Image: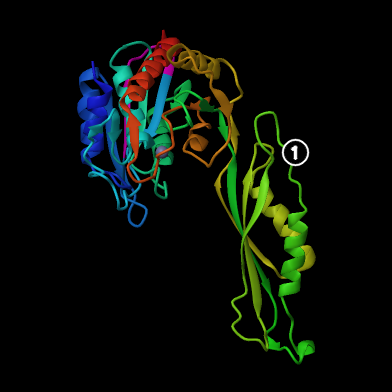
Amino acid sequence: MIDPVAFAQALLRADSVTPARGAVFDVLETALVPQGFAVDRFTVGEAPDGPVENMLAVRGDGPQHLAFAGHVDVVPPGGGWTGSPWSGEIRDGLLYGRGAVDMKGAVAAFVAAASRSDAGTLSLIITGDEEGPATYGTVALMERMASRGVVPDLCLVGEPTSTARLGDMVKIGRRGSVNIWIEVPGRQGHVAYPHLADNPIPRLIAILAEIEGVVLDEGTDWFQPSNIEVTDITVGNPAHNVIPAKASARLSIRFNDRHRGADLIEHIRAIAERHAPGVVVTGKVSGEAFLTEPGAFSTLLSDAIVGATGVTPELSTTGGTSDARFLSKLCPVVEFGLINATMHKVDEAVAVEDLRTLTDIYANVISRALD
Ligand SMILES: [Zn+2]
């Protein structure tokens, strides 16, 4: 049986700033192979977004298949730590290190939980690039799974979802995210001769004024209302007496499962073209919204959490995007992990007690899902 605390320390001592390769995966493989996992490690991509190492580990051939998804890369530690960010040291009941909560702690808890059981089919979907561009991360793992016919029935993502207490929040979906650029062309000229120029700024203001009034929806049972936020307006005109040649703005939309990213880009384009013929609107969808309707899987997880902590988790769709947005195309996905208060911060730390409790919860999920 694997001790989650000692194993988390071993993971934390392997420097794995994104994109991660090598040592941290060696630590993982050394723990999984003796448990009977078939470990498939592969490296994909080229600079600047790669190369990235990923690992698919599968054990058993039972009828039910539970997958655990996570990452072993971490954000750069930055300066100002009390100790070394790679020490994995314990002080006053807290285990310190970059990645302690996001999310080597949860990976360690799941591997320890797996060592207590041999039921069903269990897999670990572990990427070395979640914190970076994620070009060659979970998406590459899903391609690998498809080519090998690895299809889970349920997927648990171990991101740190708890807020004030371990167990207080489970994520059953995430909002989508799209960034949009609007560029209004004009004709440069002297402000004293405006009839010889064409100022793009009033048209951009009209576009943004209409966008400010758009109500995308009123929210749903599980999602807050979708929101359009203007994040930048740029003209870049240093002169008092020049009418500028162009004016641009940038928007960020966080949207619920009533929308698709591409439709939102079209919606903004239609508004912009009404006010400014010739406007250039471009968009980039960084993730679509998804929802795993509350049901058997979220209930099973909630029961395991209540059993171990006495806390009834809130089922939430708040926060930014996560790799669950990709995995939700495979099967029902829920996310549950440690308290996220110190993630990405100086002196990131997890309570040793929480690490043990999380292991109990994950072990309970494994037995409820697979037995
Ligand atoms: Zn994370």
What residue is disc 1 on?
Answer: 218
Between 40 and 290, the one lying in front of the other is 290
Pick the quarter of the image with the C terminus.
top left
Is residue 184 visible to the viewer in this orientation of the structure?
A: yes
For the residue labelled by badge 1, is the local secondary structure a helix, a strand or a loop?
Answer: loop
Residue 305 to residue 286: above or below: above
Q: Amino acid at mark 1?
A: Glu
Where 242 falls versus 166 (above or below)?
below
**Image quadrant of residue 250?**
bottom right
Q: Is residue 331 visible?
A: no
* In the displayed structure image, the side of residue 259 where residue 213 appears, left or right: right
Q: Quadrant of residue 270?
A: bottom right
Q: Residue furthest front?
A: 92
Left-right relation of 201 to 114? right
Which residue: 32% across, 47% down?
19
Q: From the viewer's perspective, is 167 left or right of 8?
A: right
